[in-house]
Image (cartoon, rainbow, N blue to C red):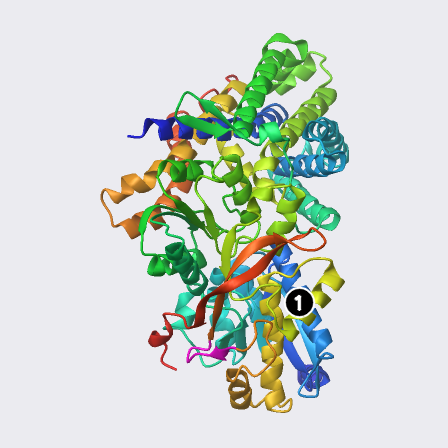
Amino acid sequence: MDWTLLTVQLLNGLQFGILLFLLASGLTLIFGIMDFVNLAHGSLYMVGAFFCATLTQWLDSFWLGLLLALPATAVVGVLVELIVVRHLYERDHLDHVLATFGLILVFDTLTQMIWGPDGQVIPLPAWLDGQVSLGDAIEVPTYRVAIILTGLAVAFGLFILVTRTRLGMQIRAGASNRKMVSALGVNIGLLFSIVFVIGAVLAGLAGMMIGPITEASIGMGNQIIIVAFVVIVIGGIGSIKGAFIAAILVGLIDIMGRSYLDVLFKMFMSAQNAETSAPAVSAMLIYILMAVILAVRPSGLFGPRGR
Amino acid sequence: MMSRLLKYFVLSLGLVATSAFADNVRIGFVTTLTTPAGAIGRDMVDAANIALDHIGHKMGGKAVEFIVEDDGFKPEIGKQKTDKLVKQDDVHFVTGFIWSHVLLASRKSALDGGKFLISANAGPSPLAGKLCHKNFFSSSWQNDQNPMATGEVLNKKGVKKLYIMSPNYAAGKNMVAGVERTFKGEIVGKDMTKWGKDMQLDFSAELAKAKASGADAIFVFYPGPAGPAFIKQYDQAGLRGKIPLYTVFTVDALSLARLQKAKLGGVLGSWNTMFWAPDLDNATNKRFVADFKAKTGRYPTHYAAQSYDAIMLIKSGVDAVNGDTSNQDGIRAGMLKADFPSVRGKYRYGSNHFPIQNFYLRTVKKDANGDWFVSHVSTVLSDHQDTYHGQCKL
């Protein structure tokens, strides 16, 4: 067993999990509190990445790009809420899925019209582009450590927001019993708008974080949004804590599958079969986990009670 | 009565419709225009249009109708679009095809429909071997050929331990088979990553494995959007200068433009192999590259070069029969001579209709304007034929 490699892979898994959490926390709030299925959440992830790329290229600074892209993504979130989403709260889930699927197509096409089919790079400042040594043998890319730290800070901020503030109290209450909250005189429309925009900004932030690694590309959110849905289902819809734990779990399982499954398979099948089947099976692992958890705990690990 | 009238009406409409475009040469072009891989399709269509401009949109004295379809990076959609081109547009030639899995899915529709199928990029091994067909031609290469050239380069550079990474699909498997065939050292690790519209773009786990494997070189095949993403992460992981990178179909004009924008200078001086280079010295190539740059402001990729050649190849076939598109035997005989000005210089066809051609070592350089491009260095393989032609019964 190569412990150095294992540690690096655990860090990689943690980093992927953190990224998933940024995406899934917004999704779980929107789904849990507003009972709104937002397939277009991944489009906001893409929009965030493209804004950050363009602003970074214009201003020649990743930090300025990031700081300005966050409010810009929030504006897009507000517009989407005002123009489309607000009119769908009363409709059923099928309408949500149809409308937000339409939004995905609109966002992808608009992005292609504005930025062209090329991906957009997000250049990093030199000090983030290198590697840091942890201990004597372990060396990881600085930027991936930065993602982990940013994600943990955001998770802490969200935790404070949800457990220690009035808004957070309303959000938690909304997640458990929406009708009761509005009957108690909380402006549910405003609460929904705020939650939607928080979700949009978090998704945008996730896109900005991954951009310097994979670059901003059209449809980049469409695949990861499926994984984010898996995360919120495992974690329990509406639960930030559940989203955090499930995201880390899914991140670790995905990375470990990619790292060690082929070695495992080679023990009992030919090398060639192991090489082709391992990636396929490791792509399935998180869905298997979801199926198992749904069988044992149908409302997820930390699903809110009282529904 | 009414229904019979209607039937005649529809029949006559059909006749009008076919006669309206009966006397031109119709070429269908299937490529990827959407998804992050859309930039490749744009390059191919731009190049095909330049080829059509160069020949005055005429082949064998007849006007050319050029119909472009988007496969959306999906085999099933590529097949649908090929069906549409064959049945609805009744084209004479179906060409384009970036992806091996899209080409394999669309092959039957075009060939069973009695059309010529010309791959301007993908070269999956079955089409060179057991599934070869009299009406299939390649204007590019068989997938294994270019990585075989890279394998030879690795041997010459004294690489003993190699780590391989490639997407898990038809072409990826061919690329790996190709380099494994010629590389004489030990393969210390191999990762086949998820591919398609939802391809894996984060290679943290794989790069960590490569780093721990003790390899003294990494070989990758990451075409299109995955290329710059991989190279960036290779840099970020601190592997530059530690484990040299050898690539096929990964460092091209599209990825270099983005890497230059991101100021990732580590790619300068890196090696790759190819059958062509933008500065390959022949008159056709000079004209093509100059016109492509003038029209698009970009360096052409190999995808563009192959698309230009695909149009010229079709023209050589149609010219041979003076525009009589019903004479398929004549067209085929014309194309088999490969007697047209190719951007790669002179080449010939093997029995399976794949090119027998040179492969060159290339390196990334700055041109006079400071733009990065892949420059021709030396010949690695001369008159190279793919390994599968023996299985072809043509």
Q: Position of residue A215 (x, y in %)?
A: 61, 41
A288 or B372: nearer the eye? B372
Q: What element does badge 1 sit on?
A: helix
Residue B91 in sight in this render: no
Whether residue A201 is in magenta: the answer is no
In the displayed structure, does residue A5 sit left or right of residue A127?
left
Could you tell me the amino acid type at mark 1?
Ala
B67 or B258: nearer the eye? B258
B313 or B264: nearer the eye? B264
Q: Residue furthest left?
A: A268
Q: Position of residue B373 (x, y in %)?
A: 62, 55
Q: Chain of mark 1?
A: B
- Which part of the image, by quadrant, shows the N terminus of chain A? top left
Task: Identify the residue at image location x=50%, y=36%.
Answer: A227
Quadrant of the rendered structure where residue B88 is? Answer: bottom right
Q: Position of residue A6 (x, y in %)?
A: 36, 29
Quadrant of the rendered structure where residue B311 is? Answer: bottom right
Q: Position of residue A41 (x, y in %)?
A: 63, 35
Q: Residue B241, relative to residue A306: is it above or below?
A: below
The span picked out in magenta is B347-353
Tell me the residue that label 1 is attached to. B47
Quadrant of the rendered structure where residue B293 is? Answer: bottom right
Q: Residue B127, relative to residue A262: is it above or below?
A: below
Whether residue B349 is in magenta: the answer is yes
Report how many numbered discs are placed on residues in the image. Answer: 1
Q: Residue A125, relative to residue B368: is it above or below?
A: above
Q: Dot 1: within a 10 Å radius of its alpha carbon, few (fewer than 14), some, or many (20 or more) residues?
A: many
Residue B266 in sight in this render: yes
Q: Principal SS element in the magenta part?
A: loop
Q: Residue A48, relative to residue B199: is it above or below?
A: above
Task: Identify the residue at image location x=61%, y=8%.
Answer: A164
